[in-house]
């Protein structure tokens, strides 16, 4: 019986050792339920793999930040792509625009380390925030480059927006108040039909996100305007990662920092277009981008 007990004990030690070894080499990645995040998750996975670790990606966590952050705190995930203002407002409970963006990023990293044992590593470069998109023909006719340029011609134009944007205080009402806009007509347009309505001339102006796939669509002639009065809150993307994962995987930090300054707004929009409109696989798109940049 003693011999059997010793054999069983040794087997358990070996199994435990193997399991720990596998865990030590595994990096668990989460993403929010949106095309952009799927692409970024695959990029992070490729970088993790290139560094010699095994990525396990869980795509499209419902609820986004509100569910991923608690799972990160419990250790269910090691890292995920997050946006600066989402972390600042939703997780830390601060108010928007309390600090300039460069100071905010430093403070984000500091508070996440102190409160959650996590780091913010590298800013990817793009900013997924609201912008104003104008039909190209209209923008060229009136020389529209900045959002403030709209004030002089808004009475002759039709604005089309999705219901959420038209109703929320920091959406359409804030846009009009900040820039003194009084559009001739305002139409409620389903979010999936805005660009079609813009292209067909049913509307002249709409709200958009700076990395919208349709902004990279060759068949959509749209011009985005500069937010010259800094109305919009910025959502720069970065990697939130548990510090214990960085300690467990010595090459992980250097791998993740390869994303720093890598992607522009237009490049992210183009990748979103390739996946959403052309139907390409997000991993293929992510890999092609990293190879083109000479990262892998």
Image (cartoon, grey):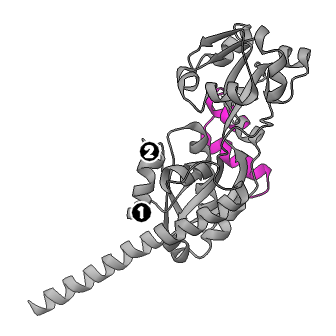
The foreground one among 202 and 181 is 181
Q: In the image, is residue 61 above or below residue 196?
A: below
Measured from the top left, where is residue 186 in percent x and y? 64, 12
The location of residue 130, given as percent across then percent down, is 67, 34
Residue 158 appears in the picture as rendered: yes
User: Local crowd at mark 1 within 10 Å, few (<14), some, or many (≥20)?
Assistant: some
Viewport quadrant of the C terminus: bottom right
The range drawn in magenta is 270-295
C-beta proximity under 8 Å, tags 2 and 1: no
| Left or right, residue 216 beside residue 4 | right
Q: Quadrant of residue 47?
A: bottom right
Instruction: Say if 22 sits above or below 13 in the image.
Output: above
Q: Give the structural element (helix, strand or loop) at label 2.
A: loop
The residue at the point 67 percent across, 45 percent down is 234
For mark 1, give the secondary structure.
Answer: helix
- In x, y percent, where is residue 141? 90, 14
Q: Which mark is residue 73?
A: 1
User: Which quadrant would the N terminus be assigned to in this image?
Assistant: bottom left
Comparing 3 with 226, the one in front is 226
Q: Residues within 10 Å of mark 2 (few under 14, many from 20)?
A: some
Q: Is residue 46 above or below residue 20?
A: above
Query: How far, Cα to Cα, is label 2 from label 1?
Result: 15 Å
Q: Is residue 245 magenta?
A: no
Look at 58% across and 37% down and name the residue there.
Answer: 35
N-terminal label among 2 and 1 = 2
Q: Main secondary structure of the magenta part?
A: helix
Q: Is residue 242 visible?
A: no
Q: Residue at label 2?
A: 61
| Image quarter of residue 158 | top right
């Amino acid at each position: 019986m003693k011999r059997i007990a010793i054999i069983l004990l040794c087997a358990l030690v070996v199994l435990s050792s193997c399991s720990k070894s596998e865990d030590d080499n595994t990096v668990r990645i989460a993403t929010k339920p949106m095309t952009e995040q799927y692409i970024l998750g695959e990029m992070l996975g490729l970088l993790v793999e290139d560094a010699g670790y095994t990525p396990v990606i869980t795509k499209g966590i419902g609820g986004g930040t509100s569910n991923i952050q608690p799972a990160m705190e419990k250790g269910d995930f090691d890292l995920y792509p997050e946006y600066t203002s989402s972390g600042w407002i939703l997780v830390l409970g601060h108010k928007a625009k309390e600090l300039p963006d460069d100071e905010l990023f430093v403070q984000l990293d500091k508070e996440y380390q102190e409160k959650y044992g996590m780091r913010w590593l590298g800013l990817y470069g793009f900013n997924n925030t609201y912008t104003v998109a104008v039909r190209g023909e209209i923008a060229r006719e009136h020389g529209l480059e900045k959002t403030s340029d709209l004030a002089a011609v808004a009475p002759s134009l039709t604005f089309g927006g999705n219901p959420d944007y038209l109703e929320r205080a920091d959406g359409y009402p804030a846009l009009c108040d900040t820039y003194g806009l009084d559009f001739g007509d305002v139409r409620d347009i389903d979010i999936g039909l805005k660009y079609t309505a813009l292209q067909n001339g049913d509307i002249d102006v709409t709200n958009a996100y700076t990395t919208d796939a349709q902004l990279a669509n060759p068949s959509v002639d749209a011009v985005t305007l500069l937010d010259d009065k800094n109305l919009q809150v910025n959502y720069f993307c970065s990697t939130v990662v548990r510090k214990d994962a960085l300690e467990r995987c010595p090459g992980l930090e250097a791998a993740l920092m390869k994303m720093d300054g890598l992607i522009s707004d237009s490049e992210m929009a183009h990748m979103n277009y390739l996946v959403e409109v052309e139907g390409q696989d997000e991993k293929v798109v992510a890999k092609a981008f990293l190879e083109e940049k000479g990262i892998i």
